Amino acid sequence: MFYGTELTSRLMLGTAQYPSPQVLRDAIAASGAEVITVSLRREGREGGAFREILKDSGCRLLPNTAGCHSAREAVTTAQMARELFGTDWIKLEVIGHADTLQPDPFALVEAAHILCAEGFEVFPYTTEDLILGEKLIEAGCRVLMPWGAPIGSGQGLSNRSGLARMRAHFPDVPLVIDAGIGAPSQAAEAMEMGFDAVLLNTAVASARNPVAMARAFGQAVEAGLAAHEAGLMPRRDMARASTPVFGMAELAG
Amino acid sequence: MRIELNGARVETGAITLAELVAERGFPETAVATALDGAFVPRGARADTALAEGARVEVLTPMQGG
């Protein structure tokens, strides 16, 4: 499903901004996530403890290129991440705007071309733009990760109809809603719409109780997936009584 | 020679990237390296010479979203 990897849990969890390493550890476990995102930064003193958490989690790692603003930076970061984390998976982020953290679509496609040619399995952080999605697939991407809303904004699916069109346009491409999810209900909504997974970080890490929130998101994603598979009823504009009229008593005077 | 290591100017006696990693006490297998913006694989560090003003990045796993 995701480059040949089947996932039971469709929640992917970020590892940043937690109040403590222990809370991070417990949140990963409570979420049920099988994929966690990680990053690369200049060598500090606490690197060893974090490596332990990653190992103990048993999760598959999805390194990101967060903070990169050019294709070259992103490619170099991806190459460093592959050696360090021992995986071909890379969450490709090439940021185009400082306020919205919107992807730079042109640099994103350029970097995706280079990385796919080098054997990376690229998870591009993209928008709901259909043509951009096509170009990423032409570049060799076999997963797309459209944003729900700007990173860390908690707004949910801010262009729901655009995302629905994207889902319909790429029926066979695994699509992951990445960024902007603030509440479990929004994650469930994405899954009900047929998205294959949800990736989030801030909504869990900045909750008053991150571990409980991680569990809530895990349950919401599971419920949303089950609902999608069960088949949602069509929406109607007018009411339709659910209790049968047949056999009703005549009581009106 | 003077180089830039993770954004800080440092004076080093190291001639190669491998020597620099050892000199600074970085855990050799737990870091990834880049020279002047290009990735240098672990196996190539010993053959990668440093020049005056070289920009070296030594990165490690960190929390990310």
Image: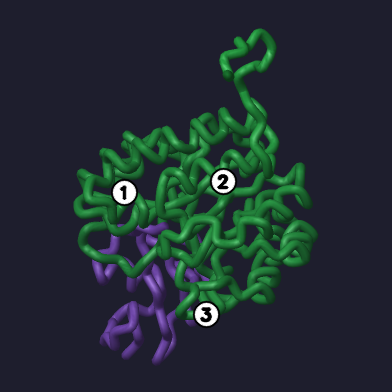
According to the picture, the residue beneath numbered tag 1 turns out to be A51
The chain drawn in green is: A
Chain on which label 1 sits: A
Q: Do the residues labelled 3 and 2 touch (CB within 8 Å)?
A: no
Chain on which label 3 sits: A
According to the picture, the residue beneath numbered tag 3 turns out to be A97
Q: Which of marks 3 and 2 is nearer the N terminus?
A: 3
According to the picture, the residue beneath numbered tag 2 turns out to be A190
Amino acid, disc 2: Ala
Q: Is residue A100 left or right of residue A1?
A: left
Q: Which of marks 1 and 2 is nearer the N terminus?
A: 1
Chain B colour is: purple
Using the image as rendered, state which of residue A202 and residue A227 is in the foreground: A227
Residue positioned 45% across, 72% down in the render: A67
Residue A125 lies, with reference to residue A175, above or below; the image says: below
Disc nearest the viewer among 1 and 2: 2
Amino acid, disc 3: His
Disc nearest the viewer among 3 and 2: 2
Q: Earlier in the sequence, mark 3 or mark 1?
A: 1
Chain on which label 2 sits: A
Indicate how the structure is coloured in the image: by chain
Alpha-carbon span between mark 1 and mark 2: 31 Å
Residue A33 drawn at (x, y percent)? 43, 38
